[in-house]
């Protein structure tokens, strides 16, 4: 489950790393950011080799950390969508910067 809450006197970088650590979290956030609102199965298909349990655990952690919100629609079968919270929206510039850096790295590594 979610990692323990870090006291306020800890380095902000350590806090950010603690929240975003995990093999899949940044990819999950990137997909939700890109699509706006995503259903569970769409996330799983887009991520490829992630297990249902791992995706569920990562989504629960992000939800507990108030980065994403889970909306359940009262339908049969139930429809569940994930999107960024107000706090989660603040990570968009970080995700864009990381994507830009990755693009730049690819170009530099190729030369």
Image: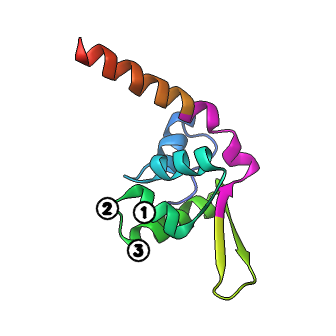
Q: CA distance from mark 2 to mark 3?
A: 12 Å
Give the residue displayed 65% in from the left and 66% down from the top.
Answer: 81
Count of numbered labels shown in the rendering: 3
Q: Position of residue 79 (x, y in %)?
A: 66, 77
Dots 2, 3 in contact, CB < 8 A:
no
Residue farthest to the bottom?
A: 76
Question: For the residue carrying disc 3, how many other residues have a C-alpha within 10 Å: few (<14), some (14-19), or many (20+)?
Answer: few
Res 45 label: 1
Would you say residue 93 sits in the magenta stretch?
Answer: yes
Whether residue 54 can be seen here = yes
In front: label 2 or label 1: 1
Residue that numbered label 3 is attached to: 53
Above or below for 69 versus 16: below
Residue 93 in the image, given as x and y percentages of width and height: 62, 30
Give residue 83's quadrant in the image.
bottom right
Asked if residue 69 is positioned above or below residue 90 in the image, the reply reads below
Instruction: Provide the residue designation for mark 2.
Output: 49
- Earlier in the chain: of badge 3 and badge 1, it is 1
Name the residue: 51% across, 63% down: 42
State how far apart marks 2 and 1 are (Cα): 8 Å
Please say if the residues under marks 3 and 1 sit with CB atoms less than 8 Å apart.
Answer: no
Residue at x 53% of width, y 26% of height: 97
* Front position in the image: 51 or 63: 51
Stretch of the chain drawn in magenta = 82-95
Residue 45: name its quadrant: bottom left
């Amino acid at each position: 489950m979610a990692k323990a809450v870090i006291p306020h006197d800890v380095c902000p970088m350590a806090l950010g790393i603690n929240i975003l650590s995990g093999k899949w979290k940044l990819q999950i956030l990137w997909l939700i950011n890109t699509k706006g609102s995503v259903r569970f199965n769409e996330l799983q298909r887009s991520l490829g080799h992630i297990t249902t349990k791992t995706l569920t655990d990562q989504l629960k952690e992000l939800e507990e950390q108030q980065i994403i919100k889970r909306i359940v629609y009262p339908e049969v079968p139930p429809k569940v969508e994930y999107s960024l919270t107000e706090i989660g929206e603040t990570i968009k510039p970080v995700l864009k910067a990381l994507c830009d850096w990755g693009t730049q790295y690819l170009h530099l590594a190729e030369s």
